Image (cartoon, helix red, strand yellow):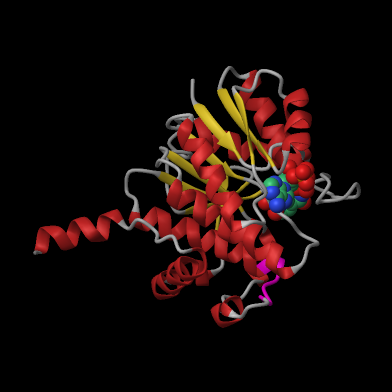
Amino acid sequence: MARILITGSADGLGQLSARSLAEHGHQVVLHARNAERGRYAQQHVPSAEHIIVGDLSDIDATKNVADQANALGRFDAVIHNAGVYQAPPNDILRVNTLAPYLLTCLIHKPKRLIYLSSDMHLQGRANLENVKKESSRISYSDSKLYVVMLCMAVARNWSDVYANAVDPGWVPTKMGGPGAPDDLQHGYETQTWLAVSNDSRATVSGRYFYHRTARRSNPQASDVMLQERFLSLCRDITGIAFPQEIQSERRAKND
Ligand SMILES: NC(=O)c1ccc[n+]([C@@H]2O[C@H](COP(=O)([O-])OP(=O)(O)OC[C@H]3O[C@@H](n4cnc5c(N)ncnc54)[C@H](OP(=O)(O)O)[C@@H]3O)[C@@H](O)[C@H]2O)c1
């Protein structure tokens, strides 16, 4: 049985993933934006081990979420699920991109990392100059491109983890709306499968999945130079550097 942290698990795909994993006997830690949403999350997943609280649109609160997670010990998997769609650009940047970055850097490294993206990332553009500006002009599509880019950078740098991104499809959650055409169950099954399955198709890294099938992602996500610029930018904005273990180990060996 695995121990899994799921961000944004008060509602939608996060809550459904948590419920499914808990029903299969896994230890689940929930996360919600505030105490009230935390209570709501607990009502829907009563067997959850713990609830972490923190608003991911606030960089300091996100760092505190990482502290709370680390105080609980190590996780087998973290599902970076929390996301916003219709929100001010700065919230889109912080919740969809900087929070997964910060939590990846700060939470004790799990064995598996899953990043919720979207097929809309295919229309995203890595305009890093726009992110730098005080009032970011980032779109939802851009933010979901950056999270695939983060996933690919993690997979490249950390050979001891499985890091993968997921497009859940357009599904009827609060975000997707009631008319969303895709199947809700298929919308969370890929994340839970990547978090716990020993299937050879799930124990891979650096892939972008839709309904358990690896798909081609935006080529910008795999551009190593862009990834490095993106990681530097996240470091400059958050004050936290990405721990690039493989590169530093290689450098140490060459010295
Ligand atoms: N639904 C779709 O069609 C679709 C398609 C493609 C990708 N996705 C992606 O799938 C993921 C899950 O989406 P969903 O459809 O389940 O959306 P949802 O129903 O709106 O749920 C999003 C979750 O993220 C949490 N969250 C949002 N902002 C937060 C913040 N500042 N701090 C802490 N938690 C925050 C929400 O908390 P509250 O409930 O308190 O707001 C909620 O639990 C997202 O990353 C989304 O971009 C969804």
Residue 242 among those drawn in magenta = no
Residue 170 visible in the snapshot: no
Name the residue located 43 percent from the left edge and 74 percent from the top edge.
229
Residue 41 is situated, as x and y percent measured from the top left of the image, at 74, 31
Residue 83: x and y in percent read 69, 52
In front: 236, or 190?
236
61 vs 89, left or right, is left
Query: Where does the C terminus fall, quadrant-wise?
Result: bottom left
**211 lies above or below 90:** above
List the single residue furthest toward the left.
255
Is 49 on the left or on the right of 233, as rendered?
right
Residue 59 percent location from the top left of the image: 59, 57
In the image, residue 3 above or below residue 148 = above
Q: How many marks?
A: 0
Q: Work out whether residue 143 or residue 170 is closer to the camera in this orientation and state it.
A: 143
**Taken as a whole, is the magenta stretch helix, strand or loop?**
loop
Q: Which image quadrant is residue 37 in?
A: top right
Is residue 103 shown to the viewer in this render?
Answer: yes
The one of 222 and 158 positioned closer to us in this rendering: 158
Q: Is residue 252 left or right of residue 138?
A: left
Query: Which residue is located at x 42 percent, y 38 percent?
Result: 110
In the displayed structure, does residue 122 sit left or right of residue 67?
right
Q: Is residue 139 magenta?
A: yes
Q: Is residue 23 above or below residue 230?
A: above
Residue 250 x %, y %: 18, 59
Residue at 45% in and 43% down = 107
Name the one closer to the observer, 144 or 99: 99
Q: Which residues are magenta?
A: 136-141
